[in-house]
């Protein structure tokens, strides 16, 4: 049976992705959009850890979460680039004038969607 915690986190990750989708408009600050992507990725990685029987740490560092998933024995290489969004978790939220990273929003949005879908398959296989 799938972990209820993993299922709940994936539901929230989908909500974060929906918010990020709306924020893809270039008129919206990249920091606001990036925060939503970071949140979706963080929750998906924590759901992944729950599906592996691991208790996710209470952190926002995507690199550390990816490392934990890898240490638990799963392949994270296709999603490693998403660790770049760690800066949106804290640094950019408290920076009045963050330096834009000029990210291709649709491309990165799709990478985050791919991660969430990957984790959904893993969680549902555990049912």
Image: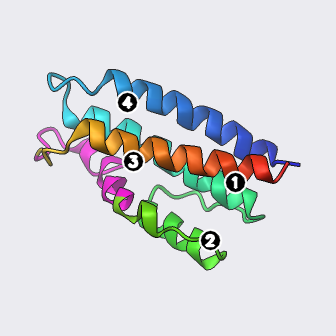
- Disc 3 + disc 1, Cβ < 8 Å: no
Q: Residue at x 31, y 45 (%)?
A: 108
The percent position of residue 58, horizontal first and vertical second, equals: 58, 57
| Mark 3 surroundings within 10 Å by alpha-carbon count, few (fewer than 14), some (14 through 19), many (20 or more) | some
| Mark 1 surroundings within 10 Å by alpha-carbon count, few (fewer than 14), some (14 through 19), many (20 or more) | some
Which range is magenta?
Answer: 82-99
Q: Which residue is mark 4?
A: 20
**Sequence order check, earlier mark of 4 and 2:** 4
Residue 34 in the figure: left or right of residue 45: left
Any magenta on residue 94? yes
For mark 2, give the secondary structure: loop
- Disc 1 + disc 2, Cβ < 8 Å: yes
Q: Residue at x 34, y 61 (%)?
A: 81
Could you tell me how far apart the alpha carbons at marks 4 and 3 are, in whole angstroms? Answer: 12 Å
Q: Quadrant of residue 14?
A: top right
Q: Which residue is mark 1?
A: 122
Instruction: Using the image, tell me which numbered label, if any, was put on residue 111.
Output: 3
Q: Residue at x 28, y 32 (%)?
A: 32
């Amino acid at each position: 049976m799938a972990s209820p915690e993993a299922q709940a986190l994936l539901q929230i990750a989908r909500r974060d992705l929906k918010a990020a989708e709306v924020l893809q408009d270039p008129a919206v600050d990249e920091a606001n959009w990036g925060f939503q992507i970071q949140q979706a990725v963080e929750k998906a990685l924590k759901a992944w850890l729950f599906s592996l029987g691991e208790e996710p740490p209470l952190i926002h560092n995507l690199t550390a979460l990816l490392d934990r998933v890898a240490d638990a024995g799963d392949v994270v290489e296709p999603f490693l680039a998403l660790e770049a969004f760690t800066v949106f978790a804290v640094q950019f939220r408290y920076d009045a004038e963050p330096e834009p990273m000029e990210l291709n929003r649709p491309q990165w949005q799709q990478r985050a969607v791919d991660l969430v879908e990957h984790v959904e398959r893993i969680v549902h296989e555990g049912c």
